[in-house]
Amino acid sequence: MSKNGILCEVNEKRVYLDPKNSDTDGINFVSHAHSDHLPTKNGGTILSSIETNEIANLRGFKMENHVESLNDFSLIDSGHILGAKGLLFHDIFYTGDICTRDRGFLKGAKIPKCKTLITECTFGLPEFVFPKMEEIQKQVNELISELYGKGIPIILMGYQLGKAQTITQLFGHWAPLYFHDSVKDMNSLHQKFGVSLKDGIGHSDAEKNGLLEKKPWVMVAPMMSSKNKFIQDMKSKYGAVTIGFSGWAQSSRFSFGRRTDYSIPMSDHCDNDELVEMVIKSEAEQVYTIHGFVDEFAQQLRRIGINAQPLMGNSLDDFT
C-alpha cells in the first residue's frame, strides 16, 4: 500500500489500483464509481469501464485521458455495481469490490485463475453469511403486503448507486412506485446502458402534485439517517415506514446496519463464505487482503492452507 492506494510495479510499469489521485507516470485503474474508489484529481492514463466513466461524470468527477482497454490488462466483471471491474494483469488479479452472487440485473463475478490475488474482505468474518436472494424477496414482499394492507407507505432504502437499482428491479412491481430524486437520476443512467428498470415519479414532483397523500405507496431512496430531514418529513407527513438493505444488518455487533424500522441483510459484496470460495477458485499462490477484516480473513485463509497476509508496506514489487 502507498499513500496513493495500491501501487504495483511490474515489468517497469507502475500500476495504481483505485488511487486517491491519478498518477501522471503510471496506469491508474478505477474499479467502479462509488465515491471511496474514485480519484479526486486527474493525471496520467485512467483505465476503467465506460459505465464507471459516465457514472463518475454524473457524480462530479470527469476522468481525463480515460481508456476502456490496454494491452496486457483485462477488465473482469466484478458483479458489485454497474460497470464495476476487477483487473487481471501479469498473473495478478485485483478484485476491487466484488460479489459472486447474482442480484437482479447484476450477475455474479466469474473468478479468473491467477498467481497473486489482491482481494477486498469487507465482510470477511464467519458471522457474515447472507440469506439467499429468493428468501430476501419473499420476506420483503410479505412485509410490504402486510404494511400495504394497513395503508402504510414504505420507503425502501439502499445506496444510491448499486443497491437502489437492485431494489428497484426486485420490488418495482409494487404500485404506485416513487423515487427519491437522486435515485431517479441514477436509474435513468442505468436505463441508458440497457438496464431494465421500472419508471416512476421523483419524490419532489410526487409531493408537489399531492400524490403522496394517496396511501399506500412504495418509494426507493438512498440509505440515510433517521435524523435526515427527508426521512423525518416522510414519517411525520405520511406515516412512512423504512426498510433498509445492508450487509451489516447480518450482525448484531454493528448497529449502523440497522438504522431503519426494518433491516434486511443484503449486500453488493461477497459474504464470508463466498470470499473463501472465490479465493479457492482463483488458485492463487499468494493472497493479499485489503479493505475490511484484513487480519481476520487472512488468518481464516491460512488455517485452510492458503498463503495469505494483509497488504502492508509501500508497494507490491515484481510479483511475477
Image: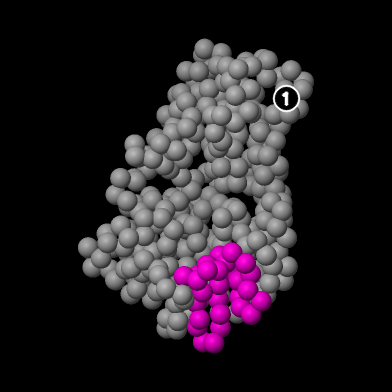
Residue located at (68% from left, 60% from top): 53
Residue located at (66% from left, 76% from top): 24
Bounds of the magenta segment: 1-30
Q: Quadrant of the C terminus?
A: bottom left
* Up/down of 281 relative to 259, above or below: below
Residue 121 figure quarter: bottom left
Question: Is residue 4 in view?
Answer: yes
Residue pointed to by mark 1: 206
Tell me residue 273's x, y (percent): 32, 52
- Nearer to the camera, 260 or 128: 260
* Up/down of 54 relative to 91, above or below: above
Question: Is residue 54 in view?
Answer: no
Q: Residue furthest bottom?
A: 12
Tell me residue 43's x, y (percent): 68, 72
Residue 166 lies within the magenta run = no
Tell me residue 128's x, y (percent): 34, 46
- Is residue 220 rendered to the left or right of residue 97? right
* Up/down of 189 relative to 156, above or below: below
Residue located at (44% from left, 34% from top): 258
Residue 48 figure quarter: bottom right
Kind of residue indicated by mark 1? Ala
